Amino acid sequence: MTHEKPCLDRAALVEVTGGNRDLERQLFRHFVGVSSGDAARLRRAISQRDCGQAALAAHRLRGASSTLGAAALADACQRLERAARDGRMDLVEAHIGAFEEQLRRVVDYLSKADGDAD
Amino acid sequence: MRETASPHIQPDLASLSFLVVEDDPFLRWMLEQLLLRAGAARVACAPDGDAGLEMLERERFDMMFCDLDMPRMDGIELMRCLATGTRVPAVIVCTAHDEPLIAAVSGIAKARGVPLVGAIAKPVTAANLAAALAGQMSGYREQPGLPHSVLSMVDASTLAAAMQAGEVHAWFQPKIDIEMGHLAGGEALARWTRPGGGTLLPAQFLSDIRREGLMQPFTLLIARQAIRGCASWRRAGIAAPVSINVDPDVFADEWLVEELSTIVLEEGLCPRDVILEVTESPAAVSSPRDLETLTRLRMRGFGLAIDDFGTGYSSMSQLVRVPYTELKIDRSFVQGAVTRKTCRAVVRSCADIAATLGIASVAEGIETDGEWALTRELGCSMAQGWRFGKAMPWARFVGLARQLRKAPLQAPA
């Protein structure tokens, strides 16, 4: 129904979990929880113009999304992390929209997949 | 000699306890989950080095997974603190870094006496974890003095029975004349083929052998098979010496010189057909006794190779004190040489030193034509590595030797 690329690489995910469905389900839930916390931390850092905290939050989000196999989201996090490391809050603000969009897609996908699996 | 394990060997985790020190909460959770699902008896987690050290004070862990990049106390500092403690777990580092850095960390761990047994590449996945646990690690060195093998914990009677039953045997890896592409020798490497399937590398059982005090019979078993193998390929018309790894533990023993001389005679060879490879380590060649053993071996005509040259302790002073006949340049320099100027300089210097001394220089760990061409250009005289062949059973080695005699490999331009 949509021509968008899937936001999650299921084949890569099998390598991550070793094909364990229970772990996969837990991983999805855990990711949703952790990423919402880190995204909130990221938004707060931006509102406080704190590049150090923004870089840290983006770094964590990048690690978690690349573990999950969410490549586009991981890329968006990496752009944020680089900009924040360089002290370029203007670039962080320029990239935050794309990040929010990718995060929303991944979280939507995970919530649906979780429902399917049950 | 340093080898990587095949990933299909799955260690038994049920008797082991793990500590995960990782600042990233997501990765920490992931490792914990994967370890528990792999059957680990206990998994504890710490968000930083200080917390990790505190837990190690209170509880004994068999193995620690340690992130290298952590705020406040990084993985290297953690290992330094670890070394001062009494209960040092085996360590696997988790890192997104490349091989040279892992090799550097491995060297630091070794210097501190911390048993670094593996590295796990990020992202942390079930596949990466299985590989790390099976002992697969680039730049990994088997650590002398491991408190115990984290993979097996095999007892003396099992080991002795395995040796008796012929499960422990020598395989051979070819050494190639770097210029002519013909066979220049074979290095004997121990393998333990278990009846249930799976072949173990020395890194996976040497610490058991050492702990159980079986280094002497093990060394003699491998030496006899290696020398016998060499004798039979000489009878088949292949004139190439055999190399045998000798653990620093056995240097101090008087029997080594006599036993080796006897085996060589019994198998109808000369000592010059046999090269003994000595790995650099703090324990190696530190006492007058070790020096005496090596000098006597050399006087009888055995070849002496300094293994993994450049990575260990006082390489240069060892080179000055011991009458080596061959210098084996560590694979980390060889493989780094293609991309890194520093490594290239090290390889060139090693080859120059060997040439000046009139001894052979062997480039270890050659996996590609590019590495072959470069080490040849840098002046090495021999090459060894997967490009030419992994360690293989005797019959296959002889087959390869025959083939190389008919058609030597063409050195790449």
Image: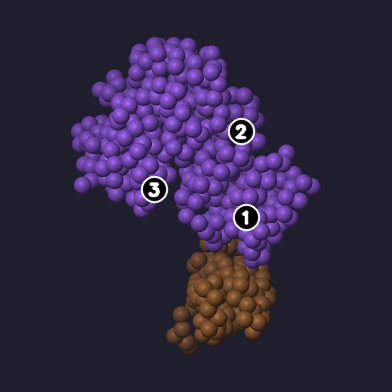
Chain colours: A brown, B purple
Q: Amino acid at mark 2?
A: Gly
Q: From the image, tell me which residue sits under label 2.
A: B145
Above or below, B60 relative to A27: above
The answer to whether residue B5 is seen in the rendering is: yes
Whether callout 3 and callout 1 share a subunit is answered yes
Above or below, B294 relative to A66: above
Rounded to the nearest angstrom, the CA distance separating label 1 from label 2 is 24 Å
**Front in this rendered view, residue B117 or A53:** A53
- Dot 1 falls on which chain? B
Count of labels in the image: 3
Q: Residue furthest bottom?
A: A1
Disc 1 on helix, strand or loop? loop
Q: From the image, tell me which residue sits under label 3.
A: B342
The label number, if any, that marks residue B74 in the structure image: 1
Q: Where is residue B226, by image quadrant?
A: top left
Give the position of the C terminus of chain A as an image quadrant.
Answer: bottom right
